[in-house]
Amino acid sequence: MNGSEIQTAFDDVFDQALVFHGFADYMRDYDVYIYATADPRTGIPPQHLRYRFKHCVRAATTSAVPPQVWKRSLDERLVDDEQRADLDGYVWGVRWQVLYPGLTLVADSPDAQQWSHHLSLPFHEATIETNGHTIALVFSDLIVDAIEPGYAPFAVTD
């Protein structure tokens, strides 16, 4: 995808739910799993999507939760959505993050330009901002796939 196509793919999931992110099991590409919904009145069914950032040479994740909220969010019961009833803190157990402000391409990224030069491939830099994390990626391409609900990228096989 070129930069314009990537930004369109980013815009398509603005304000949706990020449910998991991390390197693919072979450790080259970075995957972001998204649950996308529309207003039920549209009749458009929800989708589970995988955004695969190909040839990811940098993935940096930092917390978007401020220190004063972290301080109230250390209780282990906050990792279980059903046990959080009377607790005041960030509820980790909801198991998703709001893609807001969302995904953006970094214009004229020096890191992307450097990798483009070294590998003779176009590279891009993206920032993914949620209410839980900020993720910075440098990658060469993006592939968007619809996946089945319950897809387990790291399933153990015999």
Image: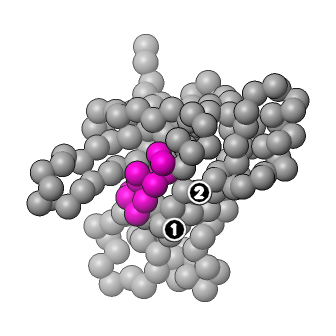
Residue neighbourhood size for the residue with mark 1, other residues' Cα within 10 Å, grouped as few (<14), some (14–19), many (≥20): few
Is there any visible trace of residue 69 in the rendered image? yes
The C terminus - image quarter: top left
Position of 149 compared to 79: left or right? left
Q: Which residue is mark 1?
A: 101
Q: Which element type, helix, strand or loop, lies under badge 1?
A: loop
Residue that protrudes farthest toward the front in the picture: 4
Q: Which element type, helix, strand or loop, lies under badge 2?
A: strand
x, y percentage for residue 144?
Answer: 45, 35
Circle on res. 104: 2
x, y percentage for residue 73?
Answer: 51, 76
Q: Nearer the viewer, residue 156 or 40?
A: 40
Magenta part of the protein: which range? 8-23
Residue occupying image coordinates x 30% and y 37%: 150
* Residue 9 lies within the magenta run: yes
Residue 141 to residue 7: above or below:
above
Disc 1 marks a residue whose amino acid type is: Pro
The N terminus - image quarter: top right
